Image (cartoon, rainbow, N blue to C red):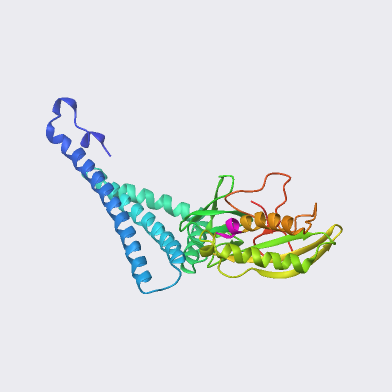
Amino acid sequence: MDLTQVLPRMEDFSIRDLLPLGKAALVLAAAWVVVRVTRRVVSGLRFRLLRLMKARGGNDLTELEKRAATVSGALQTVLSVLIWIAAIGLCLKHLGLDVAPLLAGAGAAAGIAIGLGGQNLARDVISGVFVLLEDQIRVNDVAIINGVSGVVEELNLRTTVLRDSEGVVHVFPNGAITSLANRTRLYSCYVLNVGVTFEADVDQAMEALRQIDAGMRQEAAFAPMMLEPVEVWGVDQFLDTGVVIKARLKTSPGKQWEAGREMNRRIRKEFHDRGIALMARWPQILAAEDPQAQPEAGQASPGALEPGRSEEPKA
């Protein structure tokens, strides 16, 4: 293409020659406005749908908010990309550039790209669609993806973005996700492993756990997050220095760490007041993985999130 057809010579320059540039600038400005309006419209529809579901007394509002935020975020991204592609094409047309050769070149390049890497791209997009449709995870969920624990910050058609407890952002292609665990789906659990000496009265210790739980559920700060009375499973293990009593708290999604830490604090105080001796040392049975804060090196946490016998992978 001859650039003299697009860019006039300086001696032939006139105000009329600025019209194509002005039209292109208007197109870009209009595209920016349309993108902003589209995002607001999608957000407005999301909030309106949530209010309608709340008025009808539908499913848990927190779960609905997470799913709506995830779907609306993906929809906003797709619409924004389409709008900007159309705007750039119009800009090139107003500038007098023939977009047909560009499209042909882009088509050839796209064909080569699809031939080389289209299989992985299609796999990622298809996997992302199924993650959204099946509602496996949502934005703001706490999840473990391929052994990495953290908070889901973005859920796109191609990638999932996770931020761990150290603030590190992990980006996973959806097609490369081989294992996925959602820690905050509908409800969460905090498993307590309380070690007491052989001389301690285990029946009194288990009764103390129930009384501590009952006291917490009567307080305004903890009552909304504690869904059921504590499940005291009983003596779980015999160790060289004592026995381990296992119990579990069932809480609102994501509230297990807050309730569990407070429960641990009260256990330490209540057991001391009752004369129930805690084991001086015992191995960490399960690792509590909290994306908000991790215990310092060398400190063992007596709580855990999931009941089980094997250690969870740490972030």
Residue 270: quadrant of the picture: bottom right
Judged left or right of residue 206, residue 228 is left
| Number of marks drawn | 0
Magenta run includes residue 297: no
Magenta run includes residue 258: yes
Q: In this rendered view, identify the residue nearer to me: 260 or 155.
A: 260
Q: In this rendered view, identify the residue nearer to me: 46 or 243.
A: 243
Q: Give the farthest residue toward the top.
A: 11
Vertical relation: 58 (above or below) 253: below
Is residue 13 visible in the rendered image? The answer is yes
Residue 272: quadrant of the picture: bottom right
Q: Position of residue 238 (x, y in %)?
A: 83, 64
The residue that appears at 27% across and 49% down in the rendered structure is: 31
Q: Position of residue 66 (x, y in %)?
A: 45, 61
Residue 311: quadrant of the picture: bottom right
The residue that appears at 26% across and 36% down in the rendered structure is: 2
The residue that appears at 60% across and 48% down in the rendered structure is: 293
Q: Main secondary structure of the magenta part?
A: helix
Q: Give the farthest residue toward the right.
A: 240
The residue that appears at 55% across and 66% down in the rendered structure is: 187
Judged left or right of residue 48, residue 22 is left
Image quarter of the N terminus = top left
Q: Position of residue 40 (x, y in %)?
A: 30, 55
Q: Which range of residues does the magenta coloring cover?
A: 255-259
Q: In this rendered view, identify the residue nearer to me: 293 or 197.
A: 197
Q: Position of residue 210 (x, y in %)?
A: 66, 67
Is residue 308 visible in the rendered image? The answer is no
